[in-house]
Image: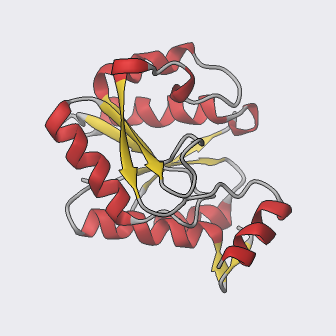
């Protein structure tokens, strides 16, 4: 919820998600939030996302990933063939990156992640997960995503321009503000 360019960080991410839904790139979305996150819930509800509370959010990313994929597996009609995992603390997300990942998945059937030109050595986000890899989430614990178990021919990289830095600390936010 930290402010960036006059709005909370998450509001910037929501714009990209809303653009992807409006363009038909995404069929909708599920937002996994901590149980005590009313302000965050309001931001995500405005985008029309299905809100799912995670009372175990403090244990790390794995619990939220498991919860979100479970909701998609159970509730989405027709069944989702893939999920795009988007982190709320990445205000540089662009709808065009989501579209490129979906396009690659439609052609290859593989999970995909971006490789940003300005950050080529860092794992890029968001990550598109083909439904065939969702069961791997059950093996995760703590603050670990599926990037730790997806290797080689299970995932493809999509080269994209720019960067999409993660904002986890006040120093990260200051660095981002200096780049802008």
Tell me what residue is drawn at x 22 percent, y 67 percent.
23
Q: Which corner quadrant holds the C terminus?
A: bottom right
Tell me what residue is drawn at x 54 percent, y 66 percent.
92
Residue 47 seen by the camera: no
Which residue is farthest top? 139
Place of residue 42 in the rendered image (x, y in percent of width and height, measured from the top left)? 57, 68
Place of residue 167 in the rendered image (x, y in percent of width and height, measured from the top left)? 70, 58
Location of residue 4 (image quadrant): bottom right
Location of residue 172 (image quadrant): bottom right
Which residue is farthest bottom? 6
The foreground one among 71 and 173 is 173
Q: Is residue 149 left or right of residue 6?
A: left
Q: Is residue 132 above or below residue 167?
A: above
Tell me what residue is drawn at x 31 percent, y 47 percent.
101
Place of residue 147 in the rendered image (x, y in percent of width and height, measured from the top left)? 53, 28
Residue 81 seen by the camera: yes
Q: Which corner quadrant holds the N terminus?
A: bottom right
Colour pattern: secondary structure
Place of residue 128 in the rendered image (x, y in percent of width and height, measured from the top left)? 37, 40
Location of residue 11 (image quadrant): bottom right
Q: Is residue 127 above or below residue 36?
A: above
The foreground one among 59 and 42 is 59
Q: How many marks?
A: 0
Q: Is residue 154 above or below residue 95?
A: above
The foreground one among 134 and 5 is 5
Tell me what residue is drawn at x 20 percent, y 30 percent.
109
């Amino acid at each position: 919820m930290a402010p960036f360019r006059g709005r909370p960080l998450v509001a910037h991410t929501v714009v990209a998600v809303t653009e992807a839904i409006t363009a038909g790139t995404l069929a909708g979305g599920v937002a996994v939030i901590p149980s005590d996150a009313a302000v965050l819930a309001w931001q995500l509800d405005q985008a029309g996302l299905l809100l799912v509370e995670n009372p175990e959010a403090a244990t790390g990313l794995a619990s939220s990933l498991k919860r979100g994929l479970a909701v998609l597996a159970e509730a989405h009609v027709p069944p989702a063939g893939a999920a795009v995992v988007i982190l709320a603390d990445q205000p540089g997300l662009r709808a065009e990156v989501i579209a490129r990942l979906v396009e690659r998945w439609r052609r290859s059937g593989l999970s995909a992640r971006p490789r940003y030109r300005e950050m080529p050595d860092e794992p890029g986000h968001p990550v598109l997960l083909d439904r065939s890899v969702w069961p791997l989430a059950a093996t995760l614990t703590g603050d670990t995503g599926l990037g730790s178990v997806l290797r080689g021919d299970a995932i493809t990289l999509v080269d994209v321009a720019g960067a999409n830095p993660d904002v986890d600390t006040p120093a990260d936010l200051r660095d981002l503000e200096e780049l802008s």
